[in-house]
Amino acid sequence: MVREQLELFLTGEGYNKIPSNLPEFTFYFHMENNYVNVFHIIDYRNELYISEDQYTHIKKKIDELFVEKGITNIHILSLILCTDYVKAKKLCKDDSLCWIIDPFHERLIVYENQVSDFYGMRGKLEYWLSHLPEAAWQEPREEVPPKQGYKKLPFITISLVIINIVIFLICTFTGDLLYNIGAFSVADFFSGKEYYRILSCIFLHWDINHLVSNMLVLYYLGEVVEKHFGHVKYIVIYFVSGIFGNLLSMSYELYTSNYAMSAGASGAIFGVIGALLFLVLIHKGHLEQITLSRLLFMIFYSLYSGFVGTNINNAAHIGGFLSGVGTAFIIWLLSSGKFRTKSNEDAARGGF
């Protein structure tokens, strides 16, 4: 409700709303003869996470919108609605044109390095905040449609776990059939031209211990990665990591002439771990209940176990892990606006 009240306030002050495809971001502008003032509203109260680069990119795109219309004297002030103002301060710590609204204390926070006023709007904003009804801060509860609730579930991770379990159960009744036609081997890949094995082997496990250990890691870590990257990007990370893990394993076997049949989701799962490491790093070493030190310990212990253990394809683990980090990095670059893509342009332009 507070956003609706803020919209009424700004439109009452002569500001026009710019439609946006991103619900957490709203823009309002006020034209004068030779310049334009813009309020860039960020609703940072829920689980929204944007990096400093994304924050800067959005403000840059707003500036470009007006430049394209022949306006060069542009003033953009970010106004962040946030219950954790320490988090908000980190986002705009180097931006002098940024204020924070603290809903708990109904106050406007302006730090020393930020502008003390914005064309007479500070006093008006503070007066508006002091007279805002308490009910305005209590967002109305809406029933989440089943489809939206379903989207929040880690259904890709759950589906992968179920598929692996079902295939293992089939293997217990069919003996070596699926292993013979689906496990990865260099000879079958090249001589038999059975290229599908580089993917099919990801869904096969040699025994119950192999299956359980992989599925436990996949479920508990995969749901975090799926939540932060989204379903489609997550499954891309999973399969790219599994494939590249097998490619590195194949290269290692060709180099050492030590050939073996291999199977397991470990390469793909190590890719998920690599993506999780990337997420923890860009979240300053802490993501939900996962800390950088604990995650690094788990990674090093898992790789060490692979080196000292027997019948463990550590090359696939390393290949999957590295490709997971790399794929997550590329996805982050594309999503954060490091590369100009059509989706970035459309999101920034909105309906203006």
Image (cartoon, rainbow, N blue to C red):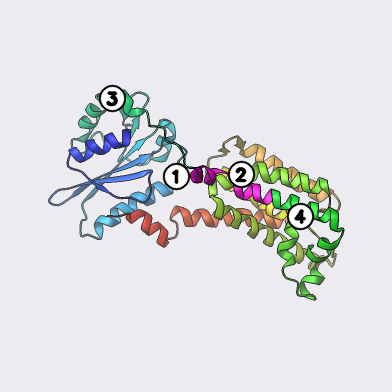
Could you tell which of marks 1 and 2 lies nearer the N-terminus?
1
Q: Mark 3 points at which residue?
A: 133
| Discs 4, 2 touching: Cβ within 8 Å | no
Q: Which marked residue is nearer to the observer: mark 1 or mark 2?
A: 2
Could you tell which of marks 2 and 3 lies nearer the N-terminus?
3
Foreground residue among 312 and 7: 7
Instruction: Report the span colored magenta.
Output: 146-161
Local packing at callout 3 (Cα closer than 10 Å; few below 14, some 14-19, many 20+) is: few
Tell how many labels: 4
Q: Where is residue 78 in the image (x, y as percent from the top left)?
A: 31, 41
Query: Where's the N terminus, which quadrant?
Result: top left
Element on which disc 2 rests: helix
| Discs 2, 3 touching: Cβ within 8 Å | no
Check the image and report above or below for 76 versus 83.
Answer: below
Check the image and report above or below for 213 versus 344.
Answer: above
Which residue is at 56% across, 38% downward?
287
Q: Where is residue 81 in the image (x, y as percent from the top left)?
A: 36, 35
